[in-house]
Image (cartoon, helix red, strand yellow):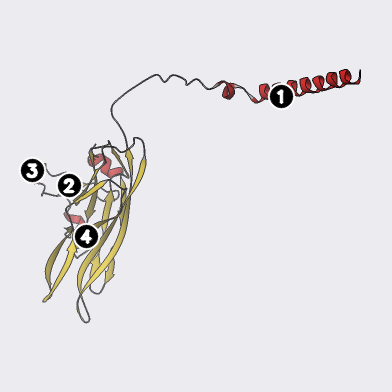
Amino acid sequence: MAIRLNALLLGVAAVMLLAPFAFAGGSFNFGTMQGGKLIAIEPGKTAEAKLYFFNIHGDRDTHVSIGVVEAPAGFKVEIDPMPHNASYNVSGVMITTTESLVTPVTPVDSLPKEKPEESATPAGVEYVTLGGVEGFVPAKVLTIRVTAPADAPLWQDYTLKLAATAGWFDVGETGPISVRQARDFTYGIRTITKEYSEEAVAEQQKPFWEQLDAWMVSTAALVLVILVLAAYVLFSRKKKK
């Protein structure tokens, strides 16, 4: 079951928007949005979740790499786009980095006031809305696909953790440098079924001794003790005669 979020849901989704921080001559921004924190999935099927990355308060492109930190045993987790190596010429120096995607600088005053048509939206980009920001923000989309084992038990909860690392290039006193910042994302995974079923379950007949309650057992034991004592007394009297 794929998790799909429209612009309205994105507006109220959990937002982690860091204020830009400065290092050397640059201002860096790592804006992220986690649309939801629960991935519901049927055994043997695949479900999706999305992470959104944007850069509206910085002045350097943000290079983002995502990896799986923790996943339930037997579940297959795929990330799209996958991390890959990319090389950049930074002020005359070649730097190679590992990244899943890049969020270019998008000045706040350049944001469209109306949501662009899908045909005019670049591949891998969705426009989202953020509280306190006027206009629609172009966000790079990272898709997480989770496939559950066919024999996974129903209505069980698991944890999926991802780690995102943002990197920026700048020029310091000694030359080009790379600055990094990390952030974790946690999802709950729940195995479900969409199929309705209802079946009466017959109560299993318990053995006779399990049906006896404590009072009955104690009463029977007391009666047995009385009978034994009575028999002993009667036997003793006959023996004396």
Mark 2–mark 4 distance (CA, rounded to whole Å): 17 Å
Q: Which residue is drawn at the image coordinates 54% and 22% (left, top)? A: 207
Q: Nearer the viewer, residue 30 or 223?
A: 223
Give the amino acid at mark 3: Ser
Q: Quarter of the image for the C terminus: give it.
A: top right
Mark 2 or 1, which is nearer the eye?
1
Q: Tell which circle, 1 or 4, labels the residue nearer the N-terminal end.
A: 4
Residue to which mark 2 is pinned: 126
Residue 156: which quarter of the image?
A: top left
Q: Tell which circle, 3 or 1, labels the residue nearer the N-terminal end.
A: 3
Mark 4–mark 3 distance (CA, rounded to whole Å): 26 Å
Give the amino acid at mark 2: Glu
Residue to which mark 4 is pinned: 64
Mark 4 or 3, which is nearer the eye?
4
Residue 39: which quarter of the image?
A: top left
Q: Nearer the viewer, residue 96 or 201?
A: 201
Q: Tell which circle, 4 or 3, labels the residue nearer the N-terminal end.
A: 4
Percent position of residue 187, x then y: 32, 47
Residue 88: which quarter of the image?
A: bottom left
SS of the residue under disc 2: strand
Q: Tell which circle, 2 or 3, labels the residue nearer the N-terminal end.
A: 3
On the question of residue 164 being in view, the answer is yes
Are the residues tagged 2 and 1 within 8 Å (C-beta)? no
Mark 1–mark 4 distance (CA, rounded to whole Å): 76 Å
Badge 2: residue crowd in 10 Å (few <14, some 14–19, many ≥20):
many
Residue to which mark 1 is pinned: 221
As drawn, is 206 to the left or to the right of 73?
A: right
As drawn, is 205 to the left or to the right of 175?
A: right
SS of the residue under disc 1: helix
Give the amino acid at mark 4: Val
